[in-house]
Image (spheres, rainbow, N blue to C red):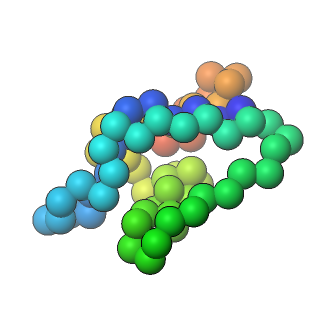
């Protein structure tokens, strides 16, 4: 399971793209991310892969390994 808590992200010089985002992705389940163009779907995937770091909040696996943490 992957759990995000109070996730915040903004690209430098921009307004926050997401604030206080909480979600849980269950192990073994298919999960979809839906939204209009420019709503942050790809950014969430980059945060999950640790290609980007959140400005605040945490994303962790249930085993306690942090995938990404604030800068």
In the image, taking residue 26 as reference, residue 57 lies left or right, namely left
Please tell me whether residue 61 is drawn above or below residue 10 in the rendered image.
above
Residue 43 percent coordinates (x, y): 46, 62
In the image, taking residue 5 as reference, residue 55 lies left or right, namely left
Q: Is residue 50 visible in this depiction of the protein?
A: yes
Q: Residue at x 72, y 51 (%)?
A: 31
Locate the C terminus and report the quarter of the image it occupies.
top left
Residue 10 percent coordinates (x, y): 27, 57
Q: Residue at x 61, y 35 (%)?
A: 24
Residue 63 percent coordinates (x, y): 70, 23
In the image, taking residue 28 as reference, residue 19 lies left or right, namely left
The total of numbered circles placed on residues is 0
Residue nearest the observer in this picture, 34 or 4: 34
Residue nearest the observer in this picture, 17 or 11: 17
Locate the N terminus and report the quarter of the image it occupies.
top right
Please tell me whether residue 34 is drawn above or below residue 28 in the rendered image.
below
Residue 54 percent coordinates (x, y): 37, 46
- Residue 7 quadrant: top left
Q: Residue furthest right?
A: 28
Q: Residue at x 60, y 59 (%)?
A: 33
Q: Residue at x 40, y 50 (%)?
A: 53
Q: Is residue 69 visible in this depiction of the protein?
A: no
Residue nearest the observer in this picture, 69 or 15: 15
């Amino acid at each position: 399971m992957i759990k995000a808590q109070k996730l915040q992200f903004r690209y430098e010089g921009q307004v926050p793209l997401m604030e206080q985002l909480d979600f849980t992705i269950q192990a073994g389940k298919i999960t979809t991310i839906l939204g209009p163009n420019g709503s942050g779907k790809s950014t969430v995937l980059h945060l999950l892969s640790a290609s980007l770091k959140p400005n605040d909040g945490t994303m962790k696996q249930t085993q306690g390994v942090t995938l990404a943490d604030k800068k």
